[in-house]
Image: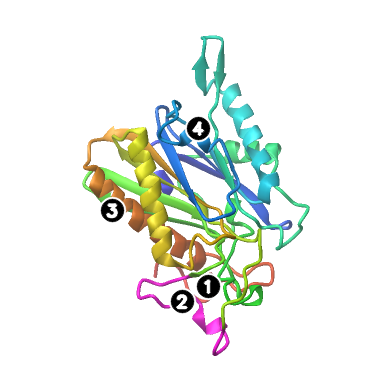
Amino acid sequence: MLTDVEGMKVGHYTDLEGMTGCTVIVPPEGTVASCEWRGGAPGDRDWVLLQPEQRVDRIHGLVLAGGSAFGLAAADGVMGWLEEHGIGWDVGGFVKVPIVPAAILFDLGIGDPKARPGAEHGRMACEAASTGPHGTGSVGAGTGCTAGKAYGREYALKSGIGTASAREGDLVVSALVAANPWGEVLFEDGTIMGAERLPAGAALKFPQPGQNTLIGAVATNAVIDKHQAFQMAKAGQDGVSTVVSPAHTRYDGDVIFGLGTRRVAAPIDIVLALSSRVVAQAVRHAVSSATSAGGLPGLADNFVVGE
């Protein structure tokens, strides 16, 4: 779980009828953050603030949402909730402005295309956020996720929210992703997850614009600065490249956020190696933990994850 990093809170809003939702991460005070996007179709809010050369280096909330660009509205509800709880960047001693970056994915092609997460749903996810175990599979931003559309949408798999963690002594590195890629997701040996659904001799199909994108976060309790958080995000994207084929296409807008709670001293190179590993594992988990929905098969119907 992402909440293996002490102090991290995660909450979901899930609309199983509309097949959409959002996921909110509320980090502990003082968490540094950056992000990197790859591919030709990102949908983001405040990602420029998080680039290494910009002044702001802390965030107060993070939103991952379905609903395409409409889903960015969920961040408004998160900002309002944080302000009501006295959380934000102190500006002049008279107002606190919460820094709440957001990234969205396209899920309007499954379920109700008019169902999109809004401000009220971002607020609901905040209310549900806790440091305990959180849902995976078809929940939150993963509710309408699909994967493996490279051979045609008719051969896609249901996907969702996936998580993974790694520990080296007191160091913890964890990832949470909503996996909605055009490409196929691969097992560690390079074979395609759910390959049995594909017809013999299947050929790659021309991607459909605006129907893809993988978004997520990789977090650590290590003492890092903003530039190192950016390196974490890049390492996480490298993890995506190892597990999605093809990754970062012109029709994906893959965004990974790097977060550091600054609690434990650790070599940055170990942090980066683990960041790549846990993001790759989280992407696989996003597919393996999703049950069938929206007319698409889910691998979790065939086996129990973790056995």
- Horizontal side of 179 relative to 165 (left or right) equals right
The label shown at residue 14 is none
Looking at the picture, how far across and down is residue 144, in whole percent? 64, 59
Where does the C terminus fall, quadrant-wise? bottom left
Q: Give, as a three-letter code, the residue at label 3.
A: Ala
Label 2 belongs to which residue? 192
Is residue 272 among what the camera can see?
yes
Residue at the bottom extreme of this rendering: 200
| Dot placed on the residue nearer the N-terminal end, 3 or 2 | 2
Label 3 belongs to which residue? 273
Asked where in the image residue 147 lies, by quadrant, the reply is bottom right
Proximity of marks 3 and 1: CB atoms separated by less than 8 Å: no
Q: CA distance from mark 3 to mark 1?
A: 28 Å
State the extent of the magenta-drawn residues as a range: 185-202
Of tags 4 and 1, which is closer to the observer? 4
Label 4 belongs to which residue? 49
Residue in the image at 45% along x and 35% along y? 27
Q: Give, as a three-letter code, the residue at label 4.
A: Leu
Of tags 4 and 2, which is closer to the observer? 4
Within 10 Å of the Cα at label 1, are there few (<14), some (14-19), or many (20+) other Cα atoms? many
Label 1 belongs to which residue? 299
Figure colour scheme: rainbow
| Dot placed on the residue nearer the N-terminal end, 4 or 3 | 4
| Dot placed on the residue nearer the N-terminal end, 4 or 2 | 4
